[in-house]
Image (tube, grey):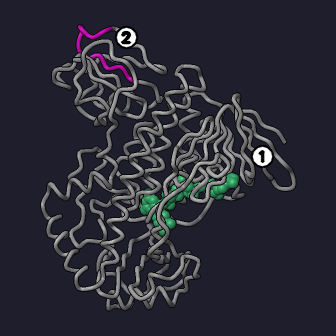
């Protein structure tokens, strides 16, 4: 079996699906190869943070996710007692959306199919070879061999990425120091609150509803068992025993739907691009799932890469634009490791000194400014990019370059994000003195905006992913 397409995406997790949607929206032919014959049913990522919901909103998709999830105005940092207050975030979505990854994948897959992405399930990629003209992936589909040729290939194939290995990209980092267990279970004892977090010298326990009215996610970091290897199977008895010792209450977990052990192994791809092969999501970075960030960061990788790769495929931008993907996203991977490693230390600080550290930091988080800073980091809203990608035709207001554009107060229609649904560049003319058009790497949608919206600016050029490229003074 042979395919020929513009871009092959390997891996149909949330990141591969998001990327495929973006590429297809921009008009590329996309083949997505996924080894699993059926969609995954495990809840895995539960937290979808504000910037990810906002990102989906940039394409008009946020309402269908919000409808299937449950907004929580608070979140945790390192399981500290003082919660992060997401309601203080400057966003139209000031919350974290609790939605199982299986549902996120379902909704993204439905959208991808509606856009015309070709999704080939049961296709295990085994080799990836590139030359100056393109990339060929070969593998097994049932009893048949297949070969998929494309101008570009993106590895969204998760932590053990074959694409990364075949491209010769290193994956340096730190071996696991801690393991935790999770169980998606039913509880026979009533809970005093919708969500629970307990920390004691015995460890950390978190309980979150899975949203189906039946199951809860229990996470246990058991001080006595957190050095077990990640390969050690988990039993319901182990989960129940750890939870009871930590909380001092038996919540009577039963009927496990999923039991798993995970670790704080932390690794980062040395580069996100090797010639015609790119990496995104867990293929590029893994870490402790603390604060619920891996899928969110991966989906942001895809959102950064999609329009850039589409512009290169369609001859609207030089290949050099793809280097900005590595330049913009790689430092954020490093930042992610700092916060997840710090959180791991806090979540495993069980002795009396560690508990003292936790209590000091928890008190600090009562300060609104400190709380907001971490809430912005975890939510993804704190991110900006350092430089303009296009050359401005006149002087700019430097503080706007690379800044995330909020969804209010600019366009006459009220929602500036609504103007980005087609995934094009947006040129917002805020004054009659602004140039009538600007040159940039991709299709541009020009709109006359509200002149008072950005004081001192005559015009804004906004990237398809919702960051300002520049504001003309
Ligand atoms: C317990 C736990 C809780 C978590 N909670 C959160 C959370 O709340 N929020 C959050 O943001 N993140 C969370 N994460 C992290 C999140 O699950 C991952 O970051 C996310 O799944 C990464 O998505 P991905 O698409 O990059 O990779 P994956 O989801 O791993 O998808 C990769 C896909 O590639 C396919 N594939 C692999 N190899 C091949 C091949 N050779 N050929 C074809 N297909 C292939 C796989 O079958 C898979 O479908 C959590 C993780 C764990 C373990």
Q: Is residue 88 left or right of residue 194?
A: left
Disc 2/disc 1 C-alpha distance (Å): 45 Å
Q: Position of residue 248 (x, y in %)?
A: 32, 91
In the rendered image, is residue 103 in sight? no
333 vs 342: above or below: above
* Prevalent SS, magenta region: loop
Label 2, on which residue? 437
Q: Is residue 279 left or right of residue 357?
A: right
Q: Is residue 297 left or right of residue 322?
A: left
Q: Position of residue 166 (x, y in %)?
A: 68, 49
Specify which label sits upstream in the sequence, 2 or 1: 1
Label 1, on which residue? 138
Write down which quadrant ligand 1 falls in.
bottom right
Q: Residues within 10 Å of mark 1 (few under 14, many from 20)?
A: some
The image's mark for residue 92 is none
Q: Is residue 366 left or right of residue 16?
A: left
The image quadrant of residue 59 is top left
Magenta stretch in the rendered image: 426-435
Q: Residues within 10 Å of mark 2 (few under 14, many from 20)?
A: few
- Is residue 432 magenta-colored? yes
In the rendered image, is residue 301 in sight? yes
Residue at (67% x, 39% y) in the render: 8
Residue at (47% x, 65% y) in the render: 174
Secondary structure found at label 1:
strand
Secondary structure found at label 2:
loop
């Amino acid at each position: 079996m042979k395919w020929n397409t513009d871009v092959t995406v390997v891996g149909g997790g949330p990141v591969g699906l998001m990327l495929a949607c973006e590429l297809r929206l921009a008009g590329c032919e996309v083949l997505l190869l996924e080894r699993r014959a059926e969609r995954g049913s495990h809840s895995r990522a539960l937290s979808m943070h504000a910037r990810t919901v906002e990102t989906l909103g940039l394409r008009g998709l946020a309402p269908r996710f919000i409808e299937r999830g449950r907004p929580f105005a608070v979140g945790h940092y390192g399981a500290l007692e003082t919660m992060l207050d997401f309601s203080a975030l400057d966003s139209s979505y000031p919350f974290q959306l609790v939605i199982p990854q299986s549902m996120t994948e379902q909704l993204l897959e439905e959208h991808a199919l509606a856009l015309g992405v070709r999704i080939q399930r049961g296709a295990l990629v085994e080799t990836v070879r590139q030359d100056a003209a393109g990339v060929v992936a070969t593998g097994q589909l049932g009893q048949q061999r297949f070969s998929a040729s494309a101008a570009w290939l993106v590895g969204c194939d998760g932590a053990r990425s074959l694409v990364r290995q075949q491209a010769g990209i290193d994956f340096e980092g730190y071996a696991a120091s801690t393991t935790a267990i999770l169980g998606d279970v039913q509880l026979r004892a009533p809970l005093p609150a919708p969500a629970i977090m307990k920390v004691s010298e015995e460890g950390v326990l978190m309980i979150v509803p899975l949203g189906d009215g039946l199951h809860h996610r229990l996470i246990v970091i058991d001080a006595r068992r957190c050095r077990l290897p990640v390969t050690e199977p988990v039993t319901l008895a182990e989960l129940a025993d750890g939870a009871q010792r930590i909380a001092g209450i038996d919540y009577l977990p039963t009927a496990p739907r999923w039991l798993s052990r995970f670790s704080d192994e932390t690794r980062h791809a040395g580069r996100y691009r090797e010639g015609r092969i790119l990496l995104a999501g867990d293929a590029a970075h893994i870490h402790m799932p603390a604060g619920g960030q891996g899928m969110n960061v991966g989906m942001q990788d895809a959102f950064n890469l999609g329009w850039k790769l589409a512009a290169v495929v369609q001859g609207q931008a030089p290949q050099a634009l793809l280097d900005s993907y590595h330049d913009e996203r790689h430092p954020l991977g490093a930042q992610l490791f700092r916060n997840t490693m710090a959180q791991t230390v806090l979540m495993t600080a069980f002795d009396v000194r560690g508990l003292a550290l936790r209590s000091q930091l928890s008190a600090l988080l009562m300060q609104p400014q400190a709380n907001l800073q971490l809430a912005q980091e975890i939510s993804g809203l704190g991110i900006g990019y350092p430089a303009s990608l296009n050359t401005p035709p006149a002087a700019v207001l430097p503080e706007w370059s690379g800044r995330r554009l909020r969804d209010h107060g600019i366009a006459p229609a009220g929602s500036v994000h609504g103007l980005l649904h087609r995934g094009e560049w947006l040129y917002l003319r805020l004054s009659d003195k602004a140039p009538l058009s600007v040159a940039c790497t991709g299709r541009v949608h020009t709109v006359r905006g509200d002149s008072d919206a950005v004081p001192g600016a005559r015009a804004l050029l906004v990237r398809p992913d919702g960051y300002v490229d520049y504001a003309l003074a």
